[in-house]
Amino acid sequence: MNFIKKLAIILGCVLTMASNGFAQSVANYPDKPIKIIVSFTAGGTTDILAREVANQMSIRWKVPVIVENKPGAAGNLGTEIVGRAPPDGYLLLANSIGPISINPTLFGNLAVNPQKALDPVALLADVPNILVVPASSGVKNWKEFLAYAKTNSGNLNYGSTGIGTTAHLISFLFAQKTGLNVVHIPYKGAEATRDLIAGRLQFMFATAPSVIPLIKAGQLNAIAVSSKKRITAMPDLPTLNELGVDIATGAWFGLFAPAGTNPTIVKKLNETVVSILEEPAIRQKLLGLGADPILMNVQEFTKFVRHDFALWAPIVKASGAKPE
C-alpha cells in the first residue's frame, strides 16, 4: 500500500472519529453548564424572563443554567458577545425586540448584525408597555395625567431602556399623537425605573413585568397599557386605544443562539422552552406579571423575527431616532 493510500485511510478514520464524537456530543446535549447572556441590567423584563426559563431548564436538564447580565450600547454588547461565540449551544442570548428588530436599522453599522449572526431559538413572551408615573406625582388616571402634562409642558422628561427600544419609540409616537412637548432620557436598563420612582422622570412606558410589582407596592401609578386589549394582570387598566390614542403595540422577548448552531440542539432548546411555557403554573405566573407566553417552533419564530425586522425598519427611519 503506497503512502497516499495510507494517508487517505488515516484521514478517513480521523474524520469518522470526529464525526462520531460530534454526533455523540449533540445527542448528549447538554452535558455541561449553559450560560444565558441578557443584554440588559438585572430587574428588567428580559432578565426576569431569562431567569425563569433558566431555572426551569436547570431543573429539567440537571445542569447549571447561568444568567449573566451584559448591558450596554442599547443591548448591542450582549448581542455581539453571543453573535461572536462558538455555535455549540452553551452560550445563548435572551434578548428583546429592540436589539434584534430595531437596532440594525437604528445603528446601521453594527459590529454584529443580529439578523445574520444569531439563530432564533424560541419566543418567550409578548409583553405590553404600561404608561406609568411616580406615585409621588399624585397623578392616578388619564384625566389627571393630561392636566399634569399641560401644566408642566416643556418640563416633561421620560425615560427608556435605551434609544430605539420600544419604550423609546412608543413614547415618541405617544408624544406625537398627543401633542406633548417632552424630552427623552435614555438609560442602559432598569436604572430608568429607579429615577422614575425618585421623581427625576415624569413618565415612562415600561414593560409590564418590570413595573407591575412597583405599581402594586405603591411606588408607581399606572395610567394605561399599550396593548390591543386589557391585560390579565391589571384588568381595570384601560388601553391607550380606549383613551383615544391610536397606539396598540408592545415588546417581545426571545432566546437566540450563535448562527450555525446545530439544528438538533436548536430544536431541543425550542422544545424545552415551549414545554416550560406550557406548564400551567409557569404560564399563570407570567400572565400575572403582564407577560403573555407565546408558543412557536423554530421555523415559526424564525419567520416571526424576519417579519418583525421588516415591520420596524420604516418606523425607525420615520422617527428620526439616532444613537447617542
Image (tube, rainbow, N blue to C red):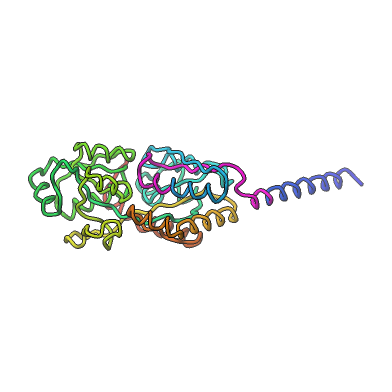
Q: Is residue 293 placed above or below 19 in the rendered structure?
A: below
Asked which quadrant contains residue 241, the reply is bottom left
Which contiguous range is marked in magenta?
A: 24-50
Q: Which residue is at a point 50% across and 46% down the rendered structure image?
A: 92
Magenta region includes residue 89: no
Residue 274 horizontal/vertical position (percent): 48, 58
Q: Which residue is at a point 66% across and 48% down the rendered structure image?
A: 25
Q: Name the quadrant of the C terminus.
A: top left
128 vs 146, left or right, is: right
Residue 19 horizontal/vertical position (percent): 71, 50
Q: Report whether residue 313 is seen.
A: no
Q: Is residue 191 placed above or below 270 in the rendered structure?
A: above
Residue 297 horizontal/vertical position (percent): 50, 61
Magenta region includes residue 40: yes
132 vs 269, left or right, is: left
58 vs 320, left or right, is: right
